[in-house]
Amino acid sequence: MVRINLLPWRETQQAQRRRQFLRLLLVAILATSLMLTTLYGYNLHSLAAYTEQNRELEHRIRELVKPLGAADQLTQQQATLATYKDQVYDWQINQAQSVRLLDELVNTLPATLTLHQVTQQGEQITLQGRATSSRDISAYIRQLATSPWLHDPQLTITTPTGQADGHQFHITVRHVFVPALSSTP
């Protein structure tokens, strides 16, 4: 029988297969790296595009917020003006009340009484004066009690002056705001 040595042929075949495998491996590595580089570039491009869109949106948002800031300032100014208007209104009412109070004090004052001092703290009004008799003081207290602006008159001090002209008195009365009467001074 004839014997054929096939070892060199097998080695040649194996070497050729190894070279083919290495070529295919190199092509696969190159294709994979090309694909990864392409994906990386695409992702960078997409990220840059999204970043630019975000910048544009932030710019537009800032432009839209500016008028809202102006509207907030106008709202604050409106609230400030409303507070100022309320203060002026209260001042006008208090001014009218003061005039009405003085008018009421003059209208209820009998001719035989004189007031030396009128003091107001909040709603409490203190009247100090002189009368010719205690009857005149009583009549004055009754007239104060009938006033719609003055309530709860109380005589706290009455001292005879020792003079011929009568008594000194000290009356406290509570001032009440009557809205229905506030329009007429």
Image (cartoon, helix red, strand yellow):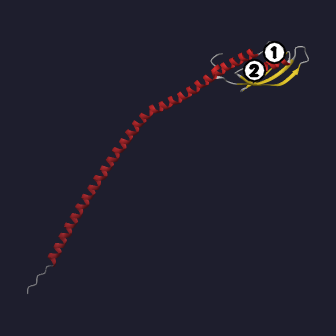
Q: Residues within 10 Å of mark 2 (few under 14, many from 20)?
A: many
> Mark 1 or mark 2, which has the lower sequence index?
1
Q: Which residue is mark 1?
A: 113
Asked whether, in this view, residue 92 is left or right of residue 32, the answer is: right
The residue depicted at 83 percent of the width and 21 percent of the height is 169
Q: Which residue is mark 2?
A: 144
Instruction: Give the percent coordinates (x, y) of residue 125.
Output: 75, 24
Instruction: State how many labels appear.
Output: 2
The secondary structure type at the circle numbered 1 is strand
Q: Between residue 172 and residue 152, name the one nearer to us.
A: 152
Which quadrant holds the N terminus? bottom left
Instruction: Give the percent coordinates (x, y) of residue 157.
Output: 84, 24
Instruction: Give the percent coordinates (x, y) of residue 17.
Output: 18, 70
The residue depicted at 16 percent of the width and 78 percent of the height is 7
Amino acid found under the numbered disc labelled 2: Leu
The answer to which image quadrant residue 162 occupies is: top right
Q: Is residue 91 visible?
A: no
The residue depicted at 59 percent of the width and 25 percent of the height is 86
The secondary structure type at the circle numbered 2 is helix
Q: Is residue 4 visible?
A: yes
Amino acid found under the numbered disc labelled 1: Leu
- Measure how far apart labels 1 and 2 are at the Cα level: 13 Å
Instruction: Give the percent coordinates (x, y) of residue 2.
Output: 8, 85
Asked whether, in this view, residue 142 is left or right of residue 52, the answer is: right
The residue depicted at 67 percent of the width and 20 percent of the height is 97
